[in-house]
Image (cartoon, helix red, strand yellow):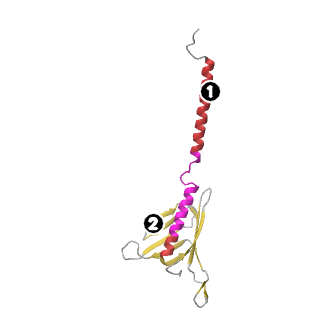
Amino acid sequence: MTRRGFTLIELVVSLSVVGILITAIGSSIVVATRSLPTSGGLAETQASTGRALMLVGEDIRLATTATILSGRRLDLTLSDRTDDAASEAVSYSWSGTSGDPLVRSFNGVDNELVSTISDFDVSSTARASFDADGRTTNPADRIVIEITTLGVEPVSVTGEFRLLNTRVP
């Protein structure tokens, strides 16, 4: 007797094995997809907040004047960067409402740095310094910036930057 096909039991067993394999492969794809970073995730929030703090620090170091308004706004004047023979006006501001963005304004053009923050604080601090005669002075020559983001895992960054070209009024 020659066999020309599969028995019903053989078909059921082979289909069961294929079903188990497909389920395992599908599950591994779902797990791998969930492990990818999502837009607006923690890593992206940390990166954008860090970039914003670095940009603020760069502008503070190059500022010729610095004015802190209500702890939520920092106005800076920088030497000419655009080759138009005029000083540049830069400001960093937050409305004070949780969830609003941190905005950088460069010569009146606004740019959103961090989309949703829960706190932005600007303050000046003095560090003791000594002159050649050994006298101690406490000039307000540093600005402290604190940015806290909003989200499931809030990100908080703080930076202290020295004013190299001016003093805080």
Secondary structure beneath disc 2? Answer: strand
Q: Is residue 50 magenta?
A: yes
Residue bearing mark 2: 110
Q: Residue furthest front?
A: 2
Name the residue at 62% across, 57% down: 153
Measured in 3D between alpha carbons, the distance from the residue under mark 2 to the one under mark 1, in whole angstroms, is 61 Å
Q: Going by the image, does 75 lie left or right of 146? A: left
Q: Pinpoint residue 130: horizontal percent, then vertical percent.
A: 60, 86
Amino acid type at circle 2 is Asp
Pointer 2 and pointer 1: residues touching (CB < 8 Å)?
no
> Which dot marks residue 103?
none
Q: Residues within 10 Å of mark 1 (few under 14, many from 20)?
A: few
Front residue of 162 and 76: 162
Q: Pinpoint residue 68: horizontal percent, then vertical percent.
A: 54, 76
Q: Going by the image, does 85 lie left or right of 126? A: left
Q: Pinpoint residue 9: horizontal percent, then vertical percent.
A: 63, 19
Front residue of 54 and 98: 54
Occupied quadrant, residue 8 = top right
Magenta span: 33-56
Residue bearing mark 1: 16
Name the residue at 50% across, 68% down: 55
Q: Residue furthest top?
A: 1
Secondary structure beneath disc 1? Answer: helix
Q: Is residue 96 above or below residue 24?
A: below
Amino acid type at circle 1 is Ser
> Looking at the magenta stretch, what is its main secondary structure?
helix
